[in-house]
């Protein structure tokens, strides 16, 4: 029996239930898919915070069992003991509250606001048509370049990795590797992309480095 409660703080559902088969050794368990940008950002967050977790790939065979946990059927989903957290933003905010070090939000209120800018999170589906996708990404990146060029130092909003970086890195990775977006008009974003690829926490979270990756 699952008890559902709407967690308004995280703007999504948190499911609380009594699990007779609690996650082994209380290790976090992440239901993920290698190509999902939402799963990608959660993997980065877990790596940045140094939290060990069990990777559970979502497959056709595992889908029926997964739907018992999340009837909505999407990833990522995080299991932490008897708590199930849905949605990448909710998961990251949960991790930020429970495991606050290192922090993923800056103290500066202006930089904190930038980390919550909606278009940093814009999603691109794997089956979008290439010309349309490139056009949409280009418009979004133009706005991001303008937003970040005066705020980015080593990372998007400062010298530490924050929430904006977790949401931005998967979008840059997909734009460059999957959709061949020409980045010459976005020097700030291109520099950030190169910086992210120097960080082990980001590299380990890359889609192609996941156990269910299709090469």
Image (cartoon, helix red, strand yellow):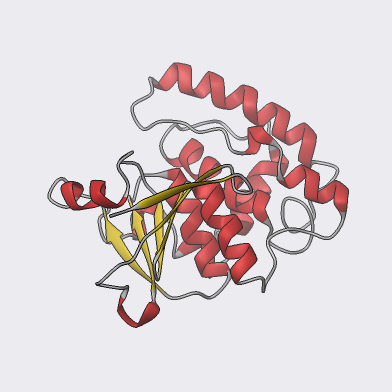
Q: Hey, which quadrant is residue 195 in on the image?
A: bottom right
Examine the rendered structure and indicate whether residue 94 appears above or below residue 35. below
Near-viewer residue (52 or 35): 52
Near-viewer residue (206 or 10): 10
Q: Left or right of 200: which side holds 186?
A: right
Question: At which x and y percent is residue 46?
Answer: 51, 66
Q: Is residue 20 visible?
A: yes
Near-viewer residue (65 or 174): 65
Name which residue lies at 44% across and 41% down: 177
Question: At which x and y percent is residue 85?
Answer: 45, 55
Name which residue lies at 36% across and 32% down: 126
Q: Could you tell me which quadrant the N terminus lies in? A: bottom left
Name which residue lies at 57% across and 64% down: 95
Examine the rendered structure and indicate whether residue 197 appears above or below residue 49. above
Q: Is residue 214 visible?
A: no
Question: At which x and y percent is residue 214?
Answer: 24, 49
Name which residue lies at 46% across and 45% down: 38
């Amino acid at each position: 029996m699952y008890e559902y409660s709407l967690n308004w703080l995280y703007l999504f559902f948190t499911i609380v239930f009594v699990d007779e088969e609690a996650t082994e050794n209380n290790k976090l368990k992440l239901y993920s898919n290698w190509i999902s940008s939402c799963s990608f950002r959660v993997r980065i967050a877990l790596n940045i915070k140094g939290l060990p977790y069990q990777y559970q790939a979502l497959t056709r065979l595992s889908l029926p069992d997964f739907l018992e946990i999340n009837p909505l059927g999407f990833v990522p989903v995080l299991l932490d003991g008897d708590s199930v957290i849905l949605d990448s933003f909710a998961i990251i905010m949960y991790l930020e509250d429970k495991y606050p070090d290192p922090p993923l939000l800056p103290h500066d209120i202006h930089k904190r606001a930038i980390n919550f800018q909606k278009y940093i999170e814009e999603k691109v589906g794997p089956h979008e048509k290439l010309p349309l996708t490139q056009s949409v990404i280009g418009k979004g990146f133009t706005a991001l370049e303008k937003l970040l060029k005066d705020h980015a130092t080593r990372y998007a909003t400062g010298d530490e990795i924050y929430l904006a970086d977790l949401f931005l890195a998967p979008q840059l990775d997909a734009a460059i590797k999957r959709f061949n977006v020409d980045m010459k008009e976005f020097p700030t974003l291109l520099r950030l992309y190169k910086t992210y690829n120097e960080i082990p926490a980001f590299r380990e979270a890359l889609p192609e480095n996941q156990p269910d990756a299709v090469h």
